[in-house]
Image (cartoon, grey):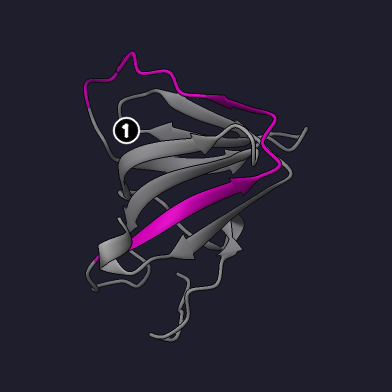
Amino acid sequence: MTKWPESETRGVSLDAVNLHDAVLYYLRTDWRERTCDIFVSVFLEPGRTARSCVIRAHGVRSVLVPHHSPWGDSGSINEQCWTPDGRCLIEMQSGDVIELDAENVELVRLEEAEI
């Protein structure tokens, strides 16, 4: 698990974080800036309360967000992984897979008011 000092809000590599059971709230894209923000609540430390964070992608080339729920409806993340060609895949517990093709993807901790 990632440990941030309480005052730290800089991003960390998505590889360093276990997103299992994180709750996805919403996505926001900025066409002009080529960014995508995915607002989530993540359990950063075992036994602690989930923290508001954003999965932030820069240099976005594409974002795919299917919502078919083949395993049943769920807003929780199952796992994340990377394809050999560098795309970030976020598998939801619904069975859907969100795909980010971007230059950089990181996790940034937010203050509660920002979500």
Which x, y percent locates residue 88?
A: 61, 38
In this picture, residue 110 sits left or right of residue 81: left
Taking depth in this image into account, of 10 and 70 the one nearest to the observer is 10
Position of the N terminus, as image quadrant, is bottom left
Chain part drawn in magenta: 50-73
Q: Is residue 28 magenta?
A: no
Which x, y percent locates residue 93?
A: 32, 33
Q: Residue at x 32, y 42 (%)?
A: 24
Q: Residue at x 64, y 35 (%)?
A: 32
Q: Residue furthest right?
A: 85
Say if residue 51 shows up in the picture: no
In this picture, residue 22 sits left or right of residue 84: left
Under mark 1, the amino acid is Gln
Under circle 1, the secondary element is loop
The residue pinned by badge 1 equals 93
Q: Residue at x 60, y 46 (%)?
A: 57
Q: Image quadrant of residue 87?
A: top right
